[in-house]
Image (cartoon, rainbow, N blue to C red):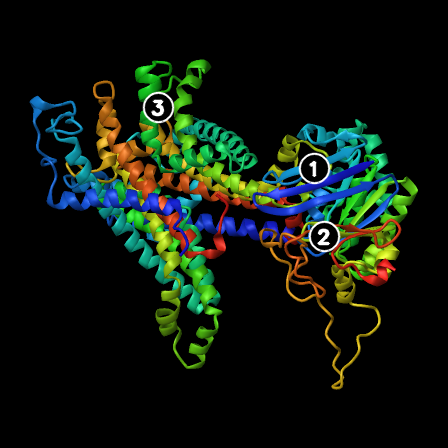
């Protein structure tokens, strides 16, 4: 069980993550959505004990009841791969180009689990088969540049699964992939999570993928978790103006309305851009871009509201429909 | 792959030929009359004529070039005018000295540079990093021959731990190795400054890449990530520089041998200049240039071994 | 205004120091650097002789200053000769392209097979050792270096729109090279020249040390060191000062070159 309480990450005066609280239990499938710079990757790195050295952390992070505040790099090394594993956005860049993918996957098996070369090889073959890599025997001997993007991502998933982790963090796992490959990878992650009773933290800015992959969702903006709840409920009736904006900005499957000249209307976007970490407003981070902003929003941090069962939002003016 | 090998080998052979043309031209056309250069202005006409005959100077230039190159390929570099023995014998006698110095210098360079460079990268923006950067900046500016003198001053003159120069021969291996320590350090320190900087920046470049994060996320220790993932990927630029440096080290031996009075090819070249022994100088310059070209050729081939991605393209 | 990089400032300060000493030596040195005084040999530092005297009683400071002049002159000549020929070849290769470009670059590759030392050895064997030969040898190795830099930079400029416009306006390739290409590759050429200046100072010192450069009594840091080497047991201090001068000069031009590159080439904002 992974438990974050009021976890904050600062870089000098700048805030990358503000008082984030989350609990992840075995088998949970939690999605985190937000734009780049919202703090979602920082949250993931904290769970891996891989926050940049320049960062200062406060709040508590416990893993299976153990407080990780004074954990050393060595302690974290013992947890990585075995308890928590991670896959990344760019499957090409995330694999050592000079190492055969078989060796890459066998490395942790031999080093962490102490398997012999033959045993590690057999296990790697099983893993490749489990993640749906065709002809695993031949693939083991190939280099990353010889595989397709989807296959590379499957290799990375196999690598992450190697030591049977309790939690798999997938940071934008489908962003760099073709749409149909992305769908299959998403489904693979869901299936693996269910079969292994492994928690899945699915980080993405792609709402469709998150909706497909997760049962719960956390929406992040400017280092804050602005809204939380069951995926279905949050996406159906978003309480936070930012979530509503995200949903509005999503290219939908149905065609956009055409105007009189036959041009497609532009995608609705959230006005303005995400401010830099150092320039965020003190109160609600979304102040300045928010369509329903009150005068106090920029200076006063909103309290947590409960728009529904198992739901929370940090907003002075949460949507009435959601509250109803 | 075969085409790649063929192209590179052809380029290598053509470069060697071009180099030999340059060496031949400088040594045979520039002097006007090599016999006069060798014997000096007060030589008798008979002596000059005899030497011209012996050197084959009466033949047309082109046939002289081809006979020089043809003979050189069979290991015949002519007769040394001053030592009165075949140049090939002189080379065979002194090549081991030069090669052992160059190889020792290379090993010292690579080991020191990898430790310093990778260490600096691993401690990026910390004291160790700054220290390595400062020392290497200084090292690049220090002439090898002056560094040699400082080493001699400290370890031979002041502390008397090591001999200031000379070479006792390999019959006493301990004494021979002791005699090689200071020359090796002097030869290698400067080059390792360059290589350490290349290693550091190359390693930093690799450390920014995603697969290093993957490796860390897989729970490997920093040390293991460094040597198993960072170093191999940082090697391509390192190998380029090492190839160029081997060339620099081999020519560097010319200087170092003269500082430490080591009986290698570098000493021989200077004795030959003093003796106006043109055939020997010509052979030695060609040999050194050939080593430089060969080192670069080997580097070209090594890329393919190191990086499987190039194999596909090659 | 961005802050100037530290290496540029330190480099510029060291370079000014060395050039200043060299320039000053043209009009004033504490003593005549050739003036011998056998009774005053190996003198310790004193008010009269700041760094003492050498084996012939000559003033060390005066010799070092005169040697700085020699070092700067040799490096300047070598970089000017090699730099202009190399840059011209690079511009030519880039302007004409095709087999001419290939040929020039092949020849440049061959040039890389000859370190300055080998070339100086050949010239010394043929003509006898002299400072002129040393300058020629150092110039020669600069040609391929500058040819490469000039060609690579020029090739980038040739693709710019204003060059296409000039071509459309009917300007010859020679005129474009002169009016548009050369001014725009000046920055990388100057950076390279600064770095090659440092290399040339090192090369001159090494060649003079080996007896292939400055001949006695011409002043040279390298030659002072070769004389000091035979006296190392007697007067180790004489082996120190000229080396420090070489390091100062080489470090200065090297840092200045790096700093100039950092300032002029925004693409290369490198980690340091």
Quarter location, residue A27: top right
Q: Secondary structure at mark 1?
A: strand
Q: Which circle, 1 or 3, is nearer the viewer? A: 1
Q: Residue at x 70, y 48 (%)?
A: A41
Marked residue chain, label 1: A
Q: In the figure, is residue C34 to the left or right of A2? A: left
Chain letter of disc 2 in the image? A
Q: Is residue A186 left or right of residue B249?
A: right
Q: Position of residue A137 (x, y in %)?
A: 84, 42
Which quarter of the rendered picture does the C terminus of chain A lie within? bottom right
Mark 2 / mark 1, whichever is N-terminal: 1
- In the image, what residue occupies the spot 26% across and 28% down? C240
Q: Are marks 2 and 1 on the same chain?
A: yes
Residue positioned 44% across, 18% down in the render? B177
Q: Position of residue B25 (x, y in %)?
A: 33, 50
The residue wearing badge 3 is B151
Disc ID at residue A59: 1
For the residues labelled 2 and 3, the Cα–Cα distance comes to 70 Å
Q: Quadrant of residue C219?
A: top left
In this orientation, does residue C232 appear? yes
Residue B137 at x, y percent in the picture: 40, 38
- Lateral position of residue A73 relative to residue B104, left or right: right
Q: Nearer the viewer, mark 2 or mark 3?
A: 2
Q: Are marks 2 and 1 in contact (CB under 8 Å)?
A: no
Residue situated in front as seen by the camera: A55 or B102: A55
Q: Which residue is mark 2?
A: A302
Up the image or down, B89 lies above or below C183; here it is above
Rendering coords of residue A139 (x, y %)? 80, 45
Q: Chain of mark 3?
A: B
**Mark 3 residue crowding within 10 angstroms, few (<14) / some (14–19) / many (20+):** some
């Amino acid at each position: 069980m992974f438990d974050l309480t009021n976890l904050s990450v600062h870089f000098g005066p700048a805030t990358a993550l503000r008082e984030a609280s989350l609990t992840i239990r075995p088998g949970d499938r939690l999605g985190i959505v937000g734009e780049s710079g919202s703090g979602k990757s920082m949250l993931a790195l904290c769970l891996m004990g891989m926050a940049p050295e320049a960062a200062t952390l406060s709040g508590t992070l416990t893993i299976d009841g153990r407080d990780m505040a004074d954990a050393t790099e060595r302690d974290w090394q013992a947890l990585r791969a075995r308890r928590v594993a991670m896959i990344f956005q760019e499957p090409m860049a995330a694999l050592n180009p000079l190492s055969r993918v078989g060796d890459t996957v066998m490395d942790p098996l031999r080093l962490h689990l102490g398997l012999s070369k033959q045993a590690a090889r057999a296990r790697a073959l099983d893993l490749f088969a489990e993640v749906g890599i065709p002809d695993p025997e031949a693939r083991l001997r190939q280099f990353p540049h010889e595989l397709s993007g989807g296959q590379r991502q499957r290799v990375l998933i196999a690598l992450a699964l190697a030591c049977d982790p309790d939690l798999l963090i997938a940071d934008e796992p489908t962003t760099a992939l073709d749409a149909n490959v992305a769908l299959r990878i998403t489904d693979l992650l869901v299936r693996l999570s269910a079969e292994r009773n492994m928690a899945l933290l699915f980080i993405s800015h792609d709402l469709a993928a998150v909706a497909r992959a997760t049962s719960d969702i956390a929406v992040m903006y400017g280092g804050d978790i602005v809204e939380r709840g069951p995926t279905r409920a949050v996406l159906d009736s978003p309480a936070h103006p930012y979530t509503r904006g995200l949903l509005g900005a999503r290219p939908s499957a149905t065609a956009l309305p055409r105007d009189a000249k036959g041009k497609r209307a532009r995608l609705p976007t959230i006005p303005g851009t995400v401010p830099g970490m150092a320039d965020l407003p003190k109160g609600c981070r979304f102040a300045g871009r928010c369509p329903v902003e009150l005068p106090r929003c920029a200076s006063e941090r909103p309290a947590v509201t409960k728009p529904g069962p198992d739901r929370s939002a940090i907003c002075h003016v949460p949507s009435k429909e959601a509250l109803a | 792959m075969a085409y790649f090998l063929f192209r590179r080998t052809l380029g290598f052979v053509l470069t060697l030929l071009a180099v030999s043309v340059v060496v031949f031209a400088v040594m045979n056309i520039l002097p006007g009359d090599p016999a006069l250069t060798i014997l000096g202005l007060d030589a008798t006409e008979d002596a000059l004529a005899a030497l011209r005959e012996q050197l084959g100077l009466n033949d047309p230039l082109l046939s002289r070039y081809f006979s020089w190159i043809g003979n050189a390929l069979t290991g015949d570099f002519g007769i040394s005018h001053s030592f009165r023995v075949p140049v090939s014998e002189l080379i065979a006698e002194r090549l081991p000295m030069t090669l052992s110095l160059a190889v020792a210098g290379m090993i010292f360079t690579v080991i020191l540079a990898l430790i310093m460079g990778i260490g600096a990268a691993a401690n990026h923006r910390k004291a160790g990093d700054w220290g390595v950067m400062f020392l290497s900046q200084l090292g690049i500016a220090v002439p090898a021959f002056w560094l040699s003198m400082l080493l001699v001053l400290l370890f031979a003159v002041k502390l008397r731990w090591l001999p200031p120069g000379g070479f006792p021969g390999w019959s006493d291996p301990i004494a021979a190795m002791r005699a090689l320590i200071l020359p090796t350090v002097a030869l290698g320190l400067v080059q390792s400054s360059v290589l350490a900087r290349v290693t550091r920046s190359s390693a930093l470049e690799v450390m920014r890449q995603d697969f290093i994060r993957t490796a860390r996320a897989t729970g490997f220790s920093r040390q293991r990530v460094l040597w198993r993932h960072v170093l191999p990927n940082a090697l391509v630029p390192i190998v380029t520089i090492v190839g160029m440096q081997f060339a620099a080290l081999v020519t560097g031996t010319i200087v170092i041998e003269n500082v430490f009075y080591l009986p290698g090819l570098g000493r021989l070249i200077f004795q030959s200049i003093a003796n106006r022994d043109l055939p020997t100088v010509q052979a030695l310059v060609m040999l050194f240039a050939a080593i430089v070209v060969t080192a670069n050729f080997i580097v070209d081939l090594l890329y393919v071994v190191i990086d499987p991605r190039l194999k596909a393209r090659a | 205004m961005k802050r100037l990089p530290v290496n540029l400032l330190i480099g510029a300060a060291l370079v000014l120091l060395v050039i200043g000493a060299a320039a000053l030596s043209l009009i004033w040195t504490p003593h005549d650097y050739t003036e011998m005084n056998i009774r005053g040999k190996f003198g310790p530092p004193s008010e009269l002789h700041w760094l003492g005297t050498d084996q012939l009683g000559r003033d060390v400071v005066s010799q070092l200053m005169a040697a700085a002049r020699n070092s700067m002159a040799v490096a300047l000549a070598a970089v000017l000769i090699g730099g202009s020929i190399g840059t011209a070849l690079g511009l030519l290769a880039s302007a004409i392209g095709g087999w001419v470009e290939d040929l020039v670059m092949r020849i440049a590759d061959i040039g890389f097979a000859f370190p300055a030392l080998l070339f100086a050895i050949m010239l010394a064997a043929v003509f006898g050792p002299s400072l002129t030969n040393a300058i020629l040898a150092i110039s020669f190795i600069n040609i391929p270096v500058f040819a490469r830099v000039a060609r690579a930079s020029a090739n980038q400029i040739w693709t710019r729109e204003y060059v296409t416009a000039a071509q459309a306006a009917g300007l010859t390739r020679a005129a474009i090279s002169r009016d548009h290409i050369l001014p725009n590759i000046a920055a990388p050429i100057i950076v390279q020249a600064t770095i090659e200046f440092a290399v040339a100072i090192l090369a001159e010192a090494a060649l003079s040390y080996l007896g292939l450069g400055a001949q006695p009594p011409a002043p040279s840091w390298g030659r002072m060191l070769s004389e000091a080497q035979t006296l190392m047991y007697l007067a180790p201090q004489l082996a120190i000062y000229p080396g420090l001068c070489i390091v100062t000069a080489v470090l200065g031009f090297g840092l200045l070159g790096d700093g100039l590159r950092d300032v002029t080439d925004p693409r290369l904002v490198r980690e340091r």
